[in-house]
Every structure is written in C-alpha cells, then in structure tokens.
Image: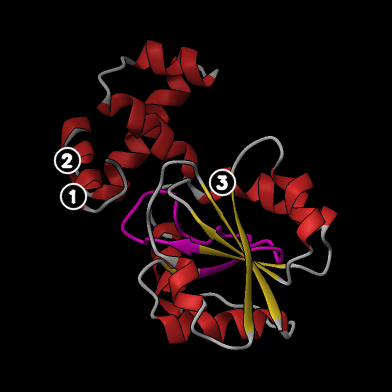
Amino acid sequence: MIRVLTVRDEGYFGVPVRSLLESHPDMNYVATLTFDEDLVQSAAVLWPDVIVIDTEYMVSQVLPFAEELHAAIGSCAMLMLCDPAKRGMLPPRHRRRSLNFLLKDASSALLADSVRRLAAGEHVVSPRLQAASLNIDRGLTTRELEVLGLAAQGDSVKEIAGRLYLSGGTVRNYLSAIISKTGARNRLDAIRIARRDGWLR
C-alpha cells in the first residue's frame, strides 16, 4: 500500500485529491495537513510514501517546506499540483529533485499513476509544465518580473529601487530590458503584454 498525504493551504478548495485517489486499492490516504508551523513535525509522524501538495502558493514559496519535509522524511516523494496559467507555478530552472510537478487538472488515472511512479523512486514532471517553464526561461527573469510587478502597481523608479534595494539606474536597466524582451513600446505597453501573457496578474 502506498501511503499518501495531502498538504494544502488553509481555506483553499481545489483538486479533490482524496476522492481522486481513494478509489485505487493500492493507495492509503492517510491525512490532509495545512501549511503551518507544525507541518513538518505532523507529516513526519505519519510517514507517508508520497506527499501531494495541492496549493495556490507559488513554487518558490513551497520549496522551503519541501526541503524541510525531505530532510525529515528522506524516503518520501513530493508532488506539487500546478496551474501553468498562474504566475510562479512552473518548475524552477534548476529543479530540486525533492519536488515533482503535475497539472492541477490531471485525471484520477494520471494522478494515481504519478503517485505510483514516485513511490517506485521515479521522478515526475508534466511535459506541459516543463515546456511552459522553458518558454518563461526565455522570457523575463524573476527579478525583471519583480520590477515590472511593482511598476504595474504604480511605483516610481525611486520607489522600486527602495523596495528591492537597487539603484535607480539598475531599475531603469531592468525596465529597458523588459521593454526590449516583450517588444513593447514603453513601460505601460510592457505591463499590458505581461498581463496578457500571464506573467502578471
């Protein structure tokens, strides 16, 4: 039996992982935990084989939890369900082996197959997520997205520089690079393009 634990952020009701997996006789759904200060300790007591992370958090926010969980339960595999249309929900360029990635809208059969593969020691990354990640890698960097996100909120160059601990000249260089990469006419056009392409909300 494969012991499966789900971790999710409190108040989020997304993919019904439990109902997708309970119909499979080789799966033992042990519990659902939320992201809080007791997560690692609670998960370690349950000794799951696979943890399915069903969250609205960005990958960068989940990675520290994943590293702690991996340290506490070394043999446990982790699978994050991701929506490629949402910013920050793509596999990072330098992927950590402790975290695997599957689409949020994966079928029961695909989710169960992925859990089985992880329990057998394989690694899982959805081809669609991998392709989307490569496309983003050829686009804006994380720092450029941070600068553009603040610009989209109406922050001035001086305000962006202060919030990100950069010089005004560096911020202007980032904005110039963003405009060039997006093919925009100016900063406002770059914000419009980034929102259209799903890089900004």
Residue of label 1: 196
Q: Which residue is drawn at 27% across and 40% down?
A: 201
In this rendering, the answer to whether 88 lies above or below 135 is: above
Q: How far apart are the two marked residues, 2 and 1, measured between alpha carbons?
A: 6 Å
Residue 166 horizontal/vertical position (percent): 52, 20
Q: How far apart are the two marked residues, 1 and 3, measured between alpha carbons?
A: 22 Å
Q: Which residue is drawn at 73% across and 86% down?
A: 120
Element on which disc 3 rests: helix
Coloring applied to the structure: secondary structure
In the image, what residue type sits under mark 2? Arg
In the image, what residue type sits under mark 1? Arg
Residue 181 horizontal/vertical position (percent): 31, 49
Q: In this view, does 69 lie to the left or right of 170?
A: right
Residue of label 3: 60
- Label 2 vs label 3, nearer the camera: 3
In the image, what residue type sits under mark 3? Ser
Give, as a single range, the part of the protein colored magenta: 81-101
Q: Is residue 85 left or right of residue 108?
A: left
Q: Which residue is drawn at 37% across and 60% down?
A: 83
Residue of label 2: 192
